[in-house]
Image (cartoon, grey):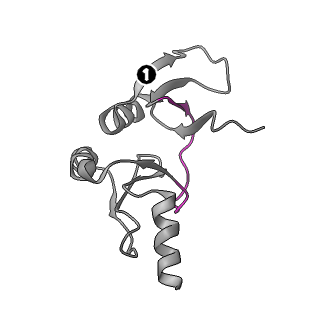
Amino acid sequence: MIQGISHITFIVRDLEKMTKFLVSIFHAKEIYSSGEQTFSISKEKFFLINGLWIAIMEGESMPEKTYNHVAFKITEEDYEFYAARVRSLGVDVKEGRTRVEGEGRSLYFYDYDNHLFELHTGTLNQRLQTYQDLSI
């Protein structure tokens, strides 16, 4: 039986630059660094973001930006706080796509290796209810 997500891994060119990204935006806590040792396929670091295990491994960046992304839930009250954090790093920020009212707000941004992240204020139940209400 699937119990949930174990971890998410991102391949990045610069472990230290991605460390700053994760800590600055998500308050990620670094819990492991391989240093020069490689127990896996390359040097790596592990982080916790509110209990979620995030791994970063040294390697080649994604060749292009796509809409594949990881979305983190935030409250509406924290939206501007996090938006300021993201913008302070000078990364490529995309304002949320046009949405149906009631879906919540989103802020999309790319890291330095073309991974897309989203900060989203809505929930699955809110979105489904909004879609159901519009279908009536």
Q: Nearer the viewer, residue 123 or 69?
A: 123
- x and y percent of residue 63 in the render? 55, 55
Q: In terms of secondary structure, where does tag 1 sit?
A: strand
Q: Judge whether residue 65 can be spotted in this image.
A: no
Q: Is residue 17 above or below residue 113?
A: above
What residue is shown with label 1? Answer: 30
Task: Judge whether residue 40 is colored magenta.
Answer: no
> Which residue is situated farthest in the right direction here?
1
Instruction: Specify the farthest residue to the bottom.
Output: 136
Q: Considering depth in this image, is 99 or 65 the residue closer to the camera?
A: 99
Q: Is residue 3 above or below residue 79?
A: above
Q: Quadrant of the N terminus?
A: top right
The residue shown at (50%, 17%) is 33
Q: Is residue 11 left or right of residue 49?
A: right
Residue 7 sits in quarter: top right
Amino acid carrying label 1: it is Glu
Q: Position of residue 12 (x, y in %)?
A: 51, 38
Please give the name of the residue rendered at 65% of the width and 38% of the height, measured from the top-left corner: 4
Q: Residue at x 49, y 37 (%)?
A: 13
Q: Residue at x 24, y 44 (%)?
A: 85
**x, y percentage for residue 105?**
34, 62
Q: Where is 114 relative to 11, above or below?
A: below
Q: Which residues are magenta?
A: 51-69
The x and y percentages for residue 101 are 36, 74
Asked whether, in this view, residue 18 is left or right of residue 60, the answer is left
Q: Quadrant for residue 2, please give it.
A: top right
